[in-house]
Image (cartoon, grey):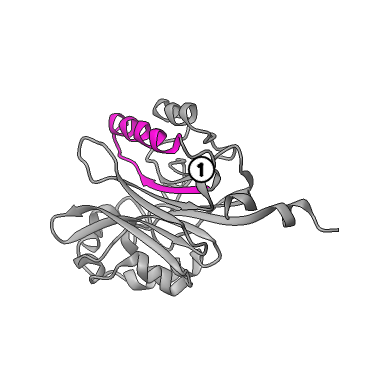
Amino acid sequence: MTSSRTTDTRRLRVLTANIQAGSSTRSYSDYVTRSWSHALPVGGKRESLDAIAKMVAGHDIVGLNEADPGSLRSGFTNQTHYLAQRAGFNYWSHQPNRKVAGVASSANGLLSRLQPVEVQDHVLPGRLGGRGLLLARFGDGEQGLTVAVAHLSLGAGSRLAQLDFIAEVLSDHPNSVLMGDFNCDADRPEMQSLYRRTRLQPPGCLVPSFPSWGPTRQIDHILVSDSLKIVQTQSVQAAYSDHLAVAMELDVPRTMLG
């Protein structure tokens, strides 16, 4: 007998990773002693990207934070595109949102084995700017699956404005996945607007992701609507980034995927 999961749902493997532009940070002291690697095209970034490509290859949809879109520090390599090619993803998109001193740039990225029907870029509010929301829609109409990637600010006030904005965008998308580096725990006061105004749920399983060499903080999240079933959540090494990646398996109704 065929199970209902096989006929009515599809198992999706999703992952969020702050890849730190391929730089290596293995301790707090590296932020000082290896700061040059965040501005120059050296420091083993290509090897780190190849390791990340192997890690993401086992997934269906991947959200990236701090992927360099092609500045000096990456050797003018669009890292989202590079990972898509190395890991065999047919569909990819990126959202450049921050430039640093003319030598470095940062982007949100999306890798997918499913073809999106639409991709949107949204600029997030904030005191300093340079933050964005990358949104992809799958399936038909409002009942399709929406996947969004965001990298939120360090300051609580800016995060509150950003989460209010995201809640407004996702309020019309009942079947959603929101993933990324939130720079805060999932139970922070500014997160409540998101849970109240959308169908996104607080994570049932808290996975520490920062710092990668001794994770104590849960700041990288995959939040899903109550219409999706979480099967498993775990952390994964993302080469030598200062963040661990967070991976999740979901059972998604096939009607949401078209």
Residue appearing at x 23%, y 46% in the figure: 130
Query: Can see residue 123?
Result: yes
User: Residue 1: x and y, percent?
Assistant: 86, 58
Q: Please name the residue that numbered disc 1 is placed on.
A: 142
* Disc 1 crowd, CA 10 A, few/some/many (<14, 14-19, 20+): some
What is the span of residues highlighted in magenta in the rendered image?
A: 145-171
Residue appearing at x 34%, y 34% in the figure: 165
Apparent side of residue 229 relative to residue 132 in the rendered image (left or right): right
Residue appearing at x 40%, y 63% in the figure: 92
State the residue in front, 253 or 246: 253
Question: Is residue 161 found inside the magenta-colored segment of the image?
Answer: yes
Question: Is residue 146 found inside the magenta-colored segment of the image?
Answer: yes
User: Residue 78: x and y, percent?
Assistant: 30, 67
User: Residue 245: x and y, percent?
Assistant: 47, 54
The residue sitting at the left extreme is 102
Residue 25 in the image: above or below residue 73 = above
- What SS does tag 1 mark? helix
The kind of residue tagged 1 is Glu
Query: Can see residue 23?
Result: no
Q: Quadrant of the C terminus?
A: bottom right
Residue 109 in the image: above or below residue 182 = below
Apparent side of residue 173 relative to residue 32 in the rendered image (left or right): right
The residue sitting at the front extreme is 141
User: Residue 194: x and y, percent?
Assistant: 44, 31
Apparent side of residue 61 relative to residue 82 in the rendered image (left or right): right
Apparent side of residue 165 relative to residue 143 in the rendered image (left or right): left
Q: Quadrant of residue 25?
A: bottom left
